[in-house]
């Protein structure tokens, strides 16, 4: 498939382009740190046969390969495609070839039904950031790398937005401010990325929540829909509240239906069906079951709600940061090399609740250590922490995986695991 703009055309890779790609890389060495190695046609053929790309787009000027853009499945997270490598030959910079390649990859992502397109760039490559942002990417605020996410495919796949985008062009109608810095609107622990489009009297606004990677707010000239919560952090196994708001701007009653879309650890059992003349606010409840704390850089467990307005569907989503009622960390203090040696375990307990609480810490009986005291009552203010010292005597030199301690709040016991390493050499 070939797309033409002026002299530059975009084509999909086949082996006949291998020699031209090798030449492109050799002429681009200075842009990639001045590497002195020389790429050959055969090396390109081998590399492209094994790179795992879904497709590879090339920018051509006649017989010359002047741009390169791979497209693959994103392996570091779910629900996204990925541009692993993008390059424009230095003597072709400034001719918007990078934009052509990125938009081609984005269009392919939409056609394949994926909701998101990700890419990385190096922190010093700030000159490319405006290009990426104009093409719909948001710069995630991370210290370790420069990661960008594009949610335009999800916008195209949302049925409720289709009437607006029959009159709006997502690229030329964009009103988004382009700043060379990480993106994000921070509210109640959430980070939101917002698109805004206007053309004539038609407008649309869509917010995506960073950790859930989904839409939390849609506003068109007809409706406003928003899914919201008071806090991003939630306590496992405790009932949580959310709000679903509809503003009807049409002046006539609309059919409004909403139901929970239970996924993984998040359970939201509710269903509402009503006729809304103006505004409607639904308050619902959900619970997050126990599991691992999610990586801050990956899609989190999410509250998902399906909504239909006059039969037009959309899905709203908020990512959650599930936590246990308390975070416990610990380590030993003292010499653990000798039997009958007195030592001390230092346990730090941090209250994750939004209220003052009393926690109970209980250690199991073990023939490896002898504890002076096994049960502790720890009072903590909300979000407070305390260091609890636990004296013990070493009875055996061995590896102790110290069973299960119990930690509870307000009479409800929860289990957490402690590990203590007892190392040494008997004399």
Image: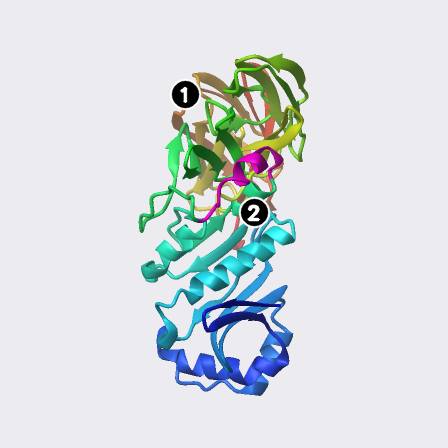
Q: Residue at x 66, y 34 (%)?
A: 263
Which mark identifies residue 113?
A: none
Which mark identifies residue 153?
A: 2
Q: Earlier in the sequence, mark 2 or mark 1?
A: 2
Region of the chain picked out in magenta, as a range: 158-171
Q: Is residue 148 above or below residue 84?
A: above
- Regarding mark 2 in the picture, which secondary structure is present there? helix
Q: Residue at x 43, y 16 (%)?
A: 356
Q: Residue at x 43, y 67 (%)?
A: 97
Q: Is residue 426 above or below residue 249?
A: below
Query: Where is residue 309, by image quadrant?
Result: top right
Task: Compare residues 165 and 105 and report the one nearer the observer.
Answer: 165
Picture coordinates of residue 2, whole percent (x, y): 58, 69
- Residue 417 in sight here: no
Picture coordinates of residue 248, whole percent (x, y): 52, 19
How much space separates mark 2 and mark 1, taking CA atoms?
Answer: 41 Å
Which mark identifies residue 382?
A: 1
Query: Where is residue 120, by image quadrant?
Result: bottom left
- Regarding mark 1 in the picture, which secondary structure is present there? loop
Picture coordinates of residue 170, whole percent (x, y): 48, 45
Q: Nearer the viewer, mark 2 or mark 1?
A: 2
- Disc 1 crowd, CA 10 A, few/some/many (<14, 14-19, 20+): some
Q: Is residue 426 magenta?
A: no
Quarter the N terminus occupies: bottom right
Q: Is residue 194 left or right of residue 417?
A: left
- Disc 2 crowd, CA 10 A, few/some/many (<14, 14-19, 20+): many
């Amino acid at each position: 498939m070939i797309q033409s703009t002026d002299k530059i055309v975009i084509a999909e890779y086949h082996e006949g382009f291998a020699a031209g790609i090798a030449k492109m890389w050799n002429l681009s060495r200075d842009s990639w740190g001045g590497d002195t190695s020389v790429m050959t046609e055969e090396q390109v053929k081998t590399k492209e046969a094994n790179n795992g790309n879904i497709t590879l787009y090339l920018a051509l000027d006649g017989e010359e390969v002047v741009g390169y853009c791979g497209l693959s499945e994103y392996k570091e997270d779910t629900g996204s495609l990925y541009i692993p490598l993008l390059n424009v030959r230095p003597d072709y910079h400034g001719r918007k070839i990078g934009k052509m390649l990125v938009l081609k990859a984005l269009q392919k992502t939409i056609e394949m039904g994926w909701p998101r397109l990700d890419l990385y760039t190096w922190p010093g490559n700030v000159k490319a950031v405006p290009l990426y942002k104009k093409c719909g990417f948001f710069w995630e605020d991370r210290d370790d790398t420069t990661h960008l996410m594009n949610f335009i495919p999800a916008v195209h796949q949302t049925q409720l937005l289709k009437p607006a985008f029959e009159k709006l062009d997502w690229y030329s109608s964009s009103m988004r401010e382009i700043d060379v810095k990480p993106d994000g609107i921070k509210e109640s622990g959430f980070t939101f990325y917002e698109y805004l489009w206007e053309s004539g009297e038609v407008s649309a606004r869509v917010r995506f929540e960073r950790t859930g990677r989904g839409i939390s707010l849609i506003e068109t000239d007809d409706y406003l829909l928003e899914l919201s919560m008071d806090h991003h952090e939630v306590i496992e196994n405790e009932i949580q509240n959310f709000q679903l708001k509809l503003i009807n701007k049409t002046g006539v009653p609309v059919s409004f239906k909403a139901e929970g879309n239970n996924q993984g650890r998040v359970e939201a059992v509710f269903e509402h069906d009503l006729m809304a003349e103006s505004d409607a606010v639904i308050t619902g409840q959900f619970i997050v079951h126990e599991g691992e704390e999610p990586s801050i850089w990956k899609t989190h467990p999410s509250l998902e709600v399906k909504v239909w307005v006059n039969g037009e569907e959309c899905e709203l989503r908020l990512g959650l940061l599930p936590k246990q009622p308390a975070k416990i960390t610990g380590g030993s203090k003292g010499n653990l090399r000798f039997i009958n040696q007195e030592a001390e375990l230092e346990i730090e307990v941090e209250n994750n609740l939004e209220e003052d609480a009393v926690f109970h810490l209980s250690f199991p009986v073990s023939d490896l250590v002898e504890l002076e005291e096994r049960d502790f009552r720890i009072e903590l203010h909300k979000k407070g922490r305390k260091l609890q010292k636990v004296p013990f005597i070493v009875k055996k030199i061995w590896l102790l995986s110290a069973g299960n301690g119990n930690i509870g709040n307000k009479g409800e016991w929860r289990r957490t695991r402690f590990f203590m390493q007892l190392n040494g050499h008997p004399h």
